[in-house]
Amino acid sequence: MEIDAKKALVSFVVVVSLVMLVLGAVGMTICFLFMWSSSHLDVMGAGMAFITGAIMMASGLISLAIVSSKAKGKDSNSEQ
């Protein structure tokens, strides 16, 4: 793969990871407001959406960690 194409792919992954991180945090914040409802259906629905936001946030954070470690040259294949 060419260096320009690799840099473009890395920057695309970083942007998507940041979007996932931010959207997960915003979703968790909005769902947290519905957890104070007196209706048990609102609380259950908000709980499921809260878990979804946590998964989105964690996946964005993990992919950012992987991309940043690969960008620093800490490739796992170089140790073998």
Image (cartoon, rainbow, N blue to C red):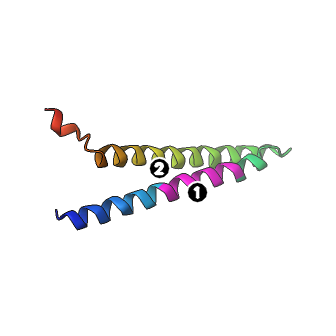
Q: In the image, what residue type sits under mark 2?
A: Gly
- Give the residue displayed 23% in from the left and 41% down from the top: 75
Q: Is residue 24 left or right of residue 70?
A: right
Q: Quadrant of residue 12?
A: bottom left
Estimate how packed mark 2 is, as few (under 14), some (14 to 19) or many (20 or more) residues with alpha carbons within 10 Å. Answer: many
Image quadrant holding the N terminus, namely: bottom left
Nearer to us in this view, 65 or 33: 65
Query: Is 45 a magenta residue?
Result: no
Q: Amino acid at mark 1?
A: Leu
Answer whether residue 27 is magenta in the image.
Answer: yes
From this viewpoint, which residue is outermost toward the top?
A: 80
Give the extent of the magenta segment.
18-29
Residue 23 image label? 1
Taking 37 as reference, is 4 above or below it? below
Query: Which quadrant holds the C terminus?
Result: top left
The label shown at residue 60 is 2
